[in-house]
Amino acid sequence: MVTISLTDPSWLRLVEAEPAATPFHHPAWAETLASAYGFEAEGLLVEPAEGPAVPVPVVRLRRRLSSLPFTDHCPLLGPETSARAILAELERLRRAEHLGAIEIRDDAEGTGHRVESGHRHELDLGAGYEAVAAGFSKSKVSRKLRRADREGIGVRFDTGSRALLEDFYPLHVGTRRRLGVPVQPRRFFAELGRRVIEPGLGFTVTAEIEGDPVCSAVFLAWNGRLVYKFSASSRDRGDVGAAQAVIREAIRWGCEHGYRSLDFGRTDAGAEGLRSFKLSWGASEHDLAYTTLADRAPRTGSGRTHELLAQVLRRSPESLTRAIGTAAYRYTA
C-alpha cells in the first residue's frame, strides 16, 4: 500500500480512469473537507494480490480513517471481485498503525461491520430530458412544476461563490435550524466555492420570486455524475414548486451536458417524506450501508440525545446555531 498526496497529478489520473468514480473521489472534495475542518487528507493506493492498485481517498480523524466524512456514498473503486482483498489490506493497515477504525462509505462485502444508513436514490439521465421528464410523478412533480411556472418563479444557475454564500447559505442556516440539525460553518461553503464550484466541479441553482431567493441547492458535477448535495428553502412563500423548479433545472443541465445520472444523496431511515419526494422523480432506490473495520461494531447514535439537541437548536436564534456549527461541527464526523 502506498500513500500519496491528493494534489499529485497521478491521483486524479487514477480516479478519472474509473467509470464508477463520483465527485466525492475527486481530490477537490477531500481537500475541501480538510481545509474547512482542519483534517488531514491523503490518498491510499491499495494493492490487492491480484489486479491493479485501487485509489481510496481518506481523511484522518484522530485515531481513525474515514473515506470520507460528511459524504453520502464513496464506493470502493475497481472490480467488485477485489472488494474483499481491498478490505483485507485496509485491515492490515489499521492494525499496523494501531487505528481504532477505518470507515468506508460503501456497503463493501468482506471483512468489517455493516452499518445500515438508510437509502440513496439515483436517476438515470442517459435517455435525455424528455424521456426523464416522462417519468416524473404527475401529482408530486409535474403539477408542482406547472404551479412554479404560473407563479413566475425565476431559476438562476450559478458557477461562482457569490450565490453559494449570499443566496444559498442564509437559506441553509434557516432550514437546518428548522429541522433541528447542526449548521455547517460558513467557511466550509467558502472552501467549497473556491475548490469545487469555481473550478467547474459543481454549481448552485436558486429559485427566486421577485428577486427574493426562496429555494437553493448545491450540485456536484464530475465524471458524468451529478450529486444533489445540499438543499435549503424558505417557508415564507409557501410550497409553490420552487424545489421542483430547482431540480428540474439541474436535470435539464445534466441531460444537455451528457451526464449519466443524478444521485439524490442519502435519505435516513424513517425519513419517509424525503424518500417519497426522491422517488417521485423516477429515481431508483438502493439500500445504503457503510462498512467499518474495527475490533467492535460501531455504536449507533442515541435517538433521545438527537431529539434533545434538535429541540435546543429549533429554539435557538440563528446566530447561536451558526456559532455552534462553527465551533463543533467538525466533531460530528
Image (cartoon, rainbow, N blue to C red):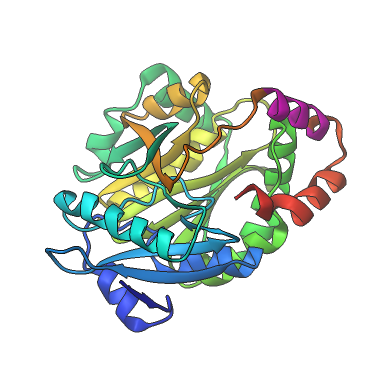
For image coordinates 73% across by 49% down, the residue present is: 170
For the record, the magenta segment spans 304-313
Query: Residue 86 appears in which quarter of the rendering?
Result: bottom left
The reply, left or right, for residue 316 in relation to residue 290 is: right
* Labels in figure, total: 0
Pinpoint residue 291: horizontal percent, then vertical percent: 38, 43
Instruction: Name the residue located 42 percent from the left edge and 45 percent from the top edge.
Output: 292
- Magenta stretch: dominant SS? helix
- Name which quarter of the figure residue 262 lies in: top left
Image height of 245 relative to 79, above or below = above
The residue positioned 53% from the left and 35% from the top of the image is 243
At which x and y percent is residue 106?
A: 35, 45
Whether residue 162 is visible: no
Residue 172 location (% of width, % of height): 67, 45
Q: Locate the N terminus and report the quarter of the image it occupies.
A: bottom left
Which residue is farthest top? 139
Q: Is residue 186 visible?
A: yes
Q: Nearer the viewer, residue 236 or 276?
A: 276
Q: Residue furthest bottom?
A: 9
Relative placement, left or right, of 46 versus 297 is left
Above or below: residue 227 compared with residue 299: below
Tell whether 107 sits left or right of 32: left
Residue 106 or 311: which is nearer the viewer?
106
Q: Position of residue 169 (x, y in %)?
A: 68, 52
Reply yes or no: does residue 15 show up in magenta. Answer: no
Work out whether 308 lies above or below 199: above
Say which residue appears at 12% left-offset and 63% top-offset.
50
